Image: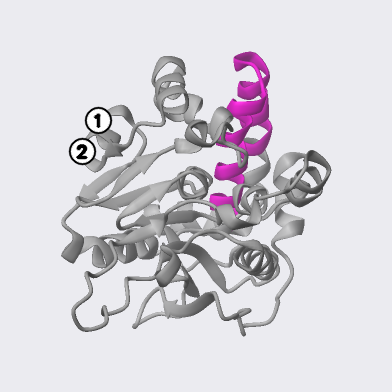
């Protein structure tokens, strides 16, 4: 079975349109188009604003459940990941800052030994997000630190507000990143900058994150949601089969040498010529009409 056939098989499950919910995770569905039946965007919000949306065991279990649900639900085309906005402060108190995810819940690290951590990080939820076959967009507003930076790096596209800040401050706890930043940061920002971020723990403001390639776009906070949803709608309107094959083929560049990666691309490209969506797209282009994808 070639790459295209394998991905086509994965996308053939219909699934339940009721997304998993929890006390710390809210998922809403938004139609890709109000005029045409193109499927849905899932907007997943990590909901622990009083803890700056820090990752704890319940959040990670919920994230894993959402990823499994996404993989099994054909009509949901794109996943948007965000963090809850801060609650209004009590009278006389200062408001908490905005946070995408301000890191892991450090209270769960106290007293934990290596055996506990190895078990917790085996088949972890951030890897489930990274391995999701569908497009993912991180909508970052505020702090994306430690595990939060790693959640963002595990998405395909990152769009940040101009008040956002990124960083990997684990070094200040006598640790290193544990959810993939030592690998994914290097691929996004380069060897030297990844070392600088991991070794110093310094924070990176949004405009600097854009300059070094950590994020795709930076926009004013008031425009963030509209910008992200517009991107999700553009992506979601494409053939979901081609999107899955394209994502897997680009990912091959991270795991294969250049020669092997080009071979993976050639196999995947050729495989799409047996799909209905290829013929639909070609005919729509030739006839100057809008493609109505079958997603197979």
Q: Is residue 283 above or below residue 42?
A: above
Distance between the alpha carbons at the discs numbered 2 and 1? 6 Å
Percent across and percent down for residue 195 are: 46, 20
Q: Is residue 54 above or below residue 23?
A: above
In the rendered image, the quadrant that contains the N terminus is top right
Q: Is residue 258 magenta?
A: yes
Q: Is residue 10 left or right of residue 76?
A: right
Query: Magenta stretch?
Result: 241-268
Q: Position of residue 112 (x, y in %)?
A: 73, 48
Q: Is residue 293 above or below residue 90?
A: above
Q: Quadrant of the C terminus?
A: bottom right
Magenta region, main secondary structure: helix
Residue 62, compared with residue 22, is above or below; it is above
Q: Quadrant of residue 74?
A: bottom right
Classed neighbour count for the residue bearing mark 2: other residues with Cα under 10 Å, few (<14), some (14–19), many (≥20): many
Q: What is the total number of numbered labels drawn onto the structure image? A: 2
Does residue 43 appear in this view? no
The reply to whether residue 185 is visible in this rendering is yes
Residue displayed at 39% across by 58% down: 100
**Drawn side of residue 222 relative to residue 32, left or right:** left
Q: Which residue is mark 2?
A: 207
- Residue sitting nearer the eye, 80 or 63: 63
In which image quadrant can residue 251 be found?
top right
Disc 2 is placed on an element classified as helix
Residue 243, x across and y down, in percent: 54, 51
Residue at x 49% of width, y 59% of height: 54
Q: Residue at x 47, y 27 (%)?
A: 198
> What residue would you read off at disc 1?
211
Which x, y percent locates residue 48?
47, 71
Whether label 2 touches label 1, CB < 8 Å: yes
């Amino acid at each position: 079975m070639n790459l295209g056939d394998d991905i086509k098989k994965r996308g053939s499950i219909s699934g339940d349109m009721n997304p998993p919910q929890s006390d710390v995770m809210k998922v809403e569905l938004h139609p890709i188009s109000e005029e045409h039946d193109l499927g849905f965007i899932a907007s997943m919000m990590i909901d622990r604003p009083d803890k700056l949306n820090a990752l704890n065991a319940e959040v990670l279990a919920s994230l894993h459940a959402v990823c499994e649900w996404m993989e099994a639900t054909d009509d949901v085309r794109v996943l948007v990941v965000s963090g809850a906005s801060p609650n209004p402060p009590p009278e006389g108190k200062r408001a908490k800052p905005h946070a995408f995810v301000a890191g892991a819940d450090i209270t769960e690290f106290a007293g934990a030994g290596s055996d506990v951590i190895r078990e917790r990080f085996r088949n972890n939820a951030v890897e489930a997000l990274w391995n999701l076959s569908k497009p993912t967009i991180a909508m970052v507003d505020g702090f994306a630190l430690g595990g939060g930076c790693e959640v963002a790096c595990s998405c395909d596209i990152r769009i940040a507000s101009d008040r956002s800040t990124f960083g990997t401050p684990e070094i200040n706890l006598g640790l290193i990143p544990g959810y993939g930043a030592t690998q994914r940061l290097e691929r996004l920002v380069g060897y030297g900058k990844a070392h600088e971020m991991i070794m110093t723990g310094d924070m990176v403001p949004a405009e600097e994150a854009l300059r070094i390639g950590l994020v795709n776009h930076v926009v004013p906070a008031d425009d963030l949601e509209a910008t992200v949803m517009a991107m999700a709608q553009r992506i979601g309107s494409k053939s979901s089969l081609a999107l899955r094959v394209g994502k897997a083929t680009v990912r091959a560049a991270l795991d294969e040498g250049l020669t092997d990666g080009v071979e993976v691309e050639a196999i995947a490209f050729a495989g799409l010529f047996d799909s209905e969506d290829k013929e639909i797209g070609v005919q729509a282009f030739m006839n100057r009409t809008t493609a109505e994808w079958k997603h197979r």
